[in-house]
Amino acid sequence: MPTDSTSLRADARRNRERILAAAGELFALRGPAVPMEEIAAHAGVGVGTLYRRFPTKDALLTAMVRARFEAFIAIAREAADAIADPLEALTTLLRRHLEQTEGDTGFQLAVMGSNALQWEGVDQQRAELSAANRRVVDRAVAAGVVRADLTPDDLPMLLCGVTSTMYFQPGFAPDWRRHLEIVLDGLRPR
Amino acid sequence: MPTDSTSLRADARRNRERILAAAGELFALRGPAVPMEEIAAHAGVGVGTLYRRFPTKDALLTAMVRARFEAFIAIAREAADAIADPLEALTTLLRRHLEQTEGDTGFQLAVMGSNALQWEGVDQQRAELSAANRRVVDRAVAAGVVRADLTPDDLPMLLCGVTSTMYFQPGFAPDWRRHLEIVLDGLRPR
DNA sequence: ACCTGAACACCGTTCAAGT
DNA sequence: ACCTGAACACCGTTCAAGT
């Protein structure tokens, strides 16, 4: 199963892109419960075609998470490279990650459960994200602006927590910024 | 639909209790995805009987959440009444809530999505929990041991966050205590 | 190669028949 | 009143037939 459009016939590639666009739109709008049938219809193809490209619903979700994962890596790298102040780099990293996640219910679920999803090259992508996170965390620890025991692995854990209130508690969703603020205060040195 | 066993025939009451026991066991063991058919079989009744007592799968989950909700109220009240130190009362409240939640995947999902669940008397139960939470929060704020802007509504938000990593990140599940520690530090005054 | 949609499997839910 | 399980509906997935 190819993970990108390379070496697909022109019509097949076009269909693949239409499917991803339709899935993105419908997941964002109505969450991961949208029927595959409907995604296929919205993309203007038969269900069989959908399943030819993405063997399960999970695989379709995975393909979308993968694309967003790139965005997360970019955010982490930019925070590591382009933001001089160590604390601002960390807070910006977390805030921008969450802003990316906001408003896409399908993606929120995917981020929270992302440990379960697998694709070709995940391990390398995870390592890249983790490396960028580590640079930001190490810099903040060295500058003494966060607790000394903070690790890069704390970031996905905490992001999952904030994302979950976004997803599960409709009434609290707009308050993810307050949740983040409390967590950020918890990262400050004692 | 009666919410307890009152005024049920003896055999019906026994069946109802068997269903709840089976559901509790299976949800805890295998999460909310267990088929209704299987719960019925495990309880030694037909599916029809299950549906006679609980009109939907959600209603069954709701009945179980309701029972646990009582436990949460008890935890909050005990923290408010029996723990003299204001900070210890708050930390114990949060920690004991999470210990209750640990290990029951079905219940974890229910807690996180609990805003969506409804039952007869929810509003009063929510009010009772909120009142007990408020007593603990107000005492901590008055003593100056937590940030001055902490509200009772922050507690479910933060608990949902910690619970979500328990649920979603199998590798991180044992780390909920670290997640809680960071959140608790975030509650300290600046 | 790729596309289609009818058909199959699984699970939540209903209901006619039985005690 | 309550119980049962076959039947129905819905949705994820497959596959025979078509281009």
Image (tube, coloured by chain):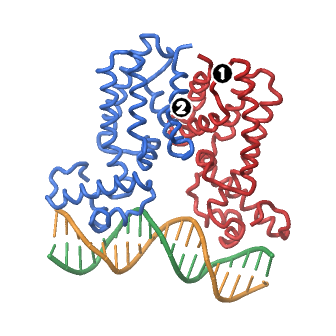
Chain colours: A red, B blue, C green, D orange
Residue B178, numbered label: 2
Give the image location of residue A174, x and y in percent.
57, 33
Quadrant of the drawing holding the N terminus of chain A? bottom right
Q: Is residue B5 above or below residue A92?
A: below
Q: Is residue A8 above or below residue A20?
A: below
Give the image location of residue A141, x and y in percent.
70, 23
B158 and B22: which one is in front?
B22
**SS at circle 1:** loop
Quadrant of the drawing holding the C terminus of chain A? top right
Q: CA–CA distance between discs 1 and 2?
A: 15 Å
Residue at coordinates 70% horizontally, 56% vertically from top-left? A119
Q: Is residue A77 left or right of residue D5?
A: right
Rendered image quadrant of residue B80: top left
Give the image location of residue B105, x and y in percent.
44, 48
Q: Is residue A139 left or right of residue B22?
A: right
The number of numbered discs placed on residues in the rendered structure image is 2
Query: In this figure, which residue is indicated by the disc labeled 1?
Result: A146
Give the image location of residue C10, x and y in percent.
48, 70
Rendered image quadrant of residue B9: bottom left
Pointer 2: residues within 10 angstroms few (<14), some, or many (20+)? Answer: some
B149 and B175: which one is in front?
B175
Look at label 2 and name its amino acid.
Arg
**SS at circle 2:** helix
